[in-house]
Amino acid sequence: MNASKRGRNVVVVGTQWGDEGKGKVVDWMTDHAQAVVRFQGGHNAGHTLVIKGVKTALQLIPSGVMRDGVRCYVGNGVVVDPAHLLSEIQRLESAGVEVRSRLRISEACPMILPFHVAVDKAREALRESSGSGKIGTTGKGIGPAYEDKVARRALRLQDLKHPERFANKLKDLLVLHNEALTGYLNAEALDFDAVYAGAMALAAEVTPMLADVGYELHQAHQRGDNILFEGAQGTLLDIDHGTYPYVTSSNCVAGNAAAGSGVGPQMLHYMLGITKAYATRVGSGPFPTELDWETEGTVGYHLSTVGQERGTVTGRARRCGWIDAAALKRAMIINGISGLCLTKLDVLDGLDEVMMAVGYELNGRRIDILPMDPAEIAACKPIYETFKGWKGTTFGVTSLDGLPSEARQYLRRIEEVVGVPIAMISTGPDREHTIVLQHPYQA
């Protein structure tokens, strides 16, 4: 087939510590896509969409589900809790959204089972009681499930189709995790019969949605469909490239869109990086530009409250600070970002001044990119540039000329420091609150 007849594919990734507003952007872009793919993470991620004023929170199912006719795929790089998956489907169905006929899930997805959740929670409790410091996990069992995958002992969704095979694998796996729970983590063991029966009760509903996702995506691409690959979390939470060990358990970067969905890297055409106009982080770990976000009257408090900075999944308050362009520069390199989408610009409305970290002072020297060592990141003192704030509103603006001149100056400087053009600007939570400078599907 002529290459020009094939579809164009876009990868959407977070370039900070997650929570950048990827869900809204994915939902907005699916008017040009026929398929949306989740390629990593689990239901520890959360995307909140606002469509005509109505909020919808998604955790595992791709954001494209809110567009009629768009096919949704969950790739092999995702760890799936079948109970949560069905709960999320039922919640969407109760709101009138058709899901099952459009959702295809890789049968190679590792399963999250009750003992993974128990181990996750018990470990965090032990870290806290021992004073070693919590990682800040969501307690959803994500990390332990990925551990089983890497150790080549995971139960996969395909095992649900074979009850006897499932039972045999479960017996060995449960012995291992129960020994950890009772012998080290001071927690209770889980019962085999209960775990097995619970999984089998879900199998009949889950297995009809299983598919060879990589091959189906290949076929879609060959017939000219546009595909959107939707990342979860953010670059600085990547297991390899983030602020280790305060990271998630999967690769959140654009390159993993291929491995996590079963397609070749030549199918990834445009990398859209999502960043807030400021910075946030949930959980533990270094955060060079963090402000006091708990004290009323401070800039950090303004960002936290006006930005409604609470986690979609956990409800935890997000730590808030100024945008860190030196950290963004690292994310641009790792992901090969083609263009940026800047979100939540309206949260900065009304501030007297706006600041941006353009580098750091580390051990008496200046550096212009985020270090790799978390101890060095924690020691970094941000070097700021200060910009005059703007009194006019940016909320809901749909053209660049409609933004205050001070806001446009701020945006231009972000482009200069990170070395990547801004392709889109989100000026509010709804689909229509978007300024398009370069459409990724038309670039």
Image (cartoon, rainbow, N blue to C red):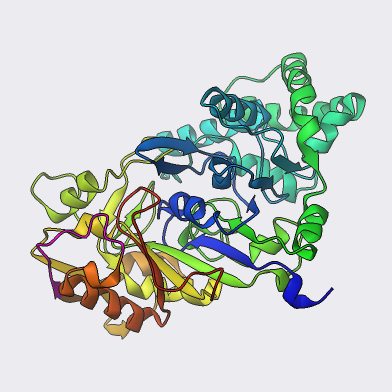
User: Does residue 344 appear to the left or right of 339 in the view shown?
Assistant: left
User: Does residue 404 appear to the left or right of 155 in the view shown?
Assistant: left
- The magenta region covers 387-398
Viewer-side residue, 329 vs 370: 329
Asked whether the viewer can see residue 119, the reply is yes
Asked whether the viewer can see residue 38, the reply is no
Which residue is found at the position 30% from the left and 57% from the top?
427
Picture layout, residue 164 above or below residue 242: above
Which residue is found at the position 42% from the left and 57% from the top?
17
Picture layout, residue 201 above or below residue 11: above
Q: Position of residue 368 (x, y in %)?
A: 35, 82
Tally of numbered discs: 0
User: Does residue 243 appear to the left or right of 346 in the view shown?
Assistant: right
Q: Does 188 appear in magenta?
A: no
Which residue is found at the position 70% from the left and 66% from the top?
7
Viewer-side residue, 255 vs 101: 101
Residue 164 falls in which quadrant of the image? top right
Q: Position of residue 28 (x, y in %)?
A: 47, 54
Q: Does 397 appear in magenta?
A: yes
Quadrant that contains the N terminus: bottom right
Viewer-side residue, 381 vs 304: 304
Picture layout, residue 17 above or below residue 90: below
Q: Position of residue 130 (x, y in %)?
A: 43, 37
Residue 42 falls in which quadrant of the image? top right
Q: Main secondary structure of the magenta part?
A: loop
Viewer-side residue, 195 vs 97: 97
Q: Position of residue 94 (x, y in %)?
A: 54, 22
